[in-house]
Amino acid sequence: MEKVENMESIKIKPETKKKLTEIAGMLEKKTGKRVSYDDVINYLIEKRFKDRKTAEKLFGIAKGVNLYEELLNGRKEDENSS
């Protein structure tokens, strides 16, 4: 773990903390190492951007159109209609 010099506090709902704890457990099982909430949040951020970059590579042929956002909007519309 890297040394953290300036730590900030953030407020989260108990349900959010529970979800972060579940993800931490999943990551600890996967890596065999103890992880912090900071590690979990960074994992989720990296995963989000990795997924976006992958989608942009797959759908990048239409220049000037944010197809990733279109994909997400389409999924939301599908969920709402079902």
Image (tube, helix red, strand yellow):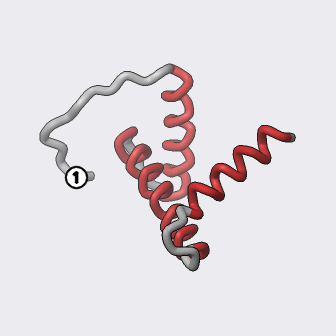
Q: Residue at x 57, y 61 (%)?
A: 68
Q: Residue at x 33, y 26 (%)?
A: 10
Q: In this picture, is 73 found above or below 19?
A: below
Q: Residue at x 54, y 65 (%)?
A: 65
Residue at the extreme front of the image, as rendered: 64
Nearer to us in this view, 73 or 8 = 73
Q: Which residue is mark 1?
A: 2
Residue at the extreme right of the image, as rendered: 82
Secondary structure type for disc 1: loop
Q: In this picture, is 39 found above or below 12?
A: below
Percent across and percent down for residue 28 are: 49, 49
Percent across and percent down for residue 13 are: 48, 21
Nearer to us in this view, 50 or 24 = 50
Nearer to us in this view, 10 or 3 = 10
Residue 59 placement, left or right of 38? right
Q: Quadrant of the C terminus?
A: top right
